[in-house]
Image: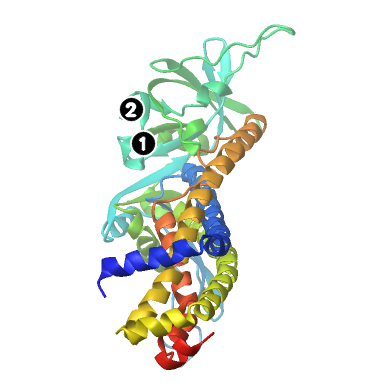
Amino acid sequence: MKFLDLIRLVLGNLNRRKGRVALTAIGVVIGTAAVVVLVSLAIGLQRNANEQLYGIGDLTQIQVSPGYSMEEVGGGRGMSGVKVAMAGGGSGGGSSTGTTLLTNDALDTLRALPGVVAVIPRDFFYGGITIKYKRLEGGANIIGVGSSNLGELGLKAGQGSLDLGKGTIIIGSQLANNFYNPYLRPGQEPPSPPDLYDQSLSFIFIKWDNEGNEIRKTVALHVVGVLTETLGESDWSIYMGLDDLKAYNEWVSGTRINYNKSGYNQVVVKVDSVDHVVDVNDQITALGFQAYTPLSFVQGINNFYQILQVIFGGVGAIALLVAAIGIANTMAMAILERTREIGLMKAIGATNRDVLTIFLGEAAGIGFVGGLGGVLIGWLSGQALNVVAIVYLAGQVSTQGGAPPSVAVYTPAWLPIFALLFSTLIGLISGLYPALRAATMVPVIALKYE
């Protein structure tokens, strides 16, 4: 039997029992629509969470800190393979705290790891700080970076440049909101945030001597760039060269800082691809350092939503399985009604395979028609739910703050195709037993059936 003849025959048989086919297909429609809506909801929640989480930092970066561990120190005869603490330590048996320092040699080791494109040390200002601009005052988190261009940290300039030089700073997009007028009289309207780009700010660094006396140092620094908003640490921070920050910290502590001996407090490791971040993170940990990447948190969230997709999809699949019982029942009734027709087909030369193919085609056709309707209804329901959810969530964001969601229900291109194929497969499997019964009928007995 030719394929086109089979399609024509299947469509004709289904058309003869429109009411029964429609009622049976409704079950498939409901199941398929449930699969599409529920899985789309889980995917939309995952995408929305990822949009929010991507603001926690560049996912190709790894934050590295000195490593701390308890090292065994041997002291008895016959002990071998003793691990000596890298810092601290002592003689005799017991344990000691070991510290793996981020010295310049350690930074060279990190740079040699496969996939690492940049290793940038960072430090923070240790003393007190007051920042003045005209009559306004403010404060901020000051970060010194061992790079002449903040582009290596994945940051972008909204105004000006990302290049850092001596006596220059780059500020976050929200820093201007930290400034206020200390001389504001009651009832007077507060000033709007100033435009700090290409301005000189007065930094009053503060420290205290052993007797508790306050000592101040005023420095003028020029703003050469303003970063774009990232919803992260950089929005409220001030960046300067590490050498400049080191000099200010030496003034605060009253001692010289030697990174080769004391090591850096923090290092940012930039990896060439998100795919390599976890592997590089594990290698850094194996070297004895503490390492953290935002990607590990994002992966944990994604794993949760993937499990949620499976659960939601399973709920919809249960509805499809119920519909499968309806298809099997419909096909079984069709065989009883068409027993003489089956006997006639086999009497004029139809093989068991031909009969089996016809009934399987009818069962698959019911699954396909129901799946097509379910995909359409599921997609339309998802779009309606998307509009309602976004309006509601946007209202929540406006009162609580944060970025508004861009999507609540998202239907990827593969989902309708998968749902349609799955519903067709369910129909095919449901019709397998009735089709086998029809194919194995004896023609003489089938023709005698009343």
x and y, in percent, of residue 363 in the image: 46, 71
Q: Nearer the viewer, residue 286 or 401?
A: 401
Q: Secondary structure at mark 2?
A: loop
x and y, in percent, of residue 233 in the image: 50, 38
x and y, in percent, of residue 210 in the image: 62, 37
Q: CA distance from mark 1 to mark 2?
A: 8 Å
> Where does label 1 land, which residue?
243
State if disc 2 and disc 1 touch (CB < 8 Å): yes
Q: Residue at x 51, y 68 (%)?
A: 69
Q: Is the residue 299 above or below the residue 131 in the image?
A: below
Q: Residue at x 35, y 85 (%)?
A: 346
Q: Secondary structure at mark 1?
A: helix
> Where does label 2 land, which residue?
166
Amino acid under disc 1:
Asp
Q: Is the residue 218 above or below the residue 366 in the image?
A: above
Q: Residue at x 60, y 40 (%)?
A: 389
In which quadrant is the N terminus drawn?
bottom left
- Residue 177, quarter of the rendered image: top right
Amino acid under disc 2:
Lys
Q: Earlier in the sequence, mark 1 or mark 2?
A: 2
Q: Residue at x 45, y 84 (%)?
A: 438
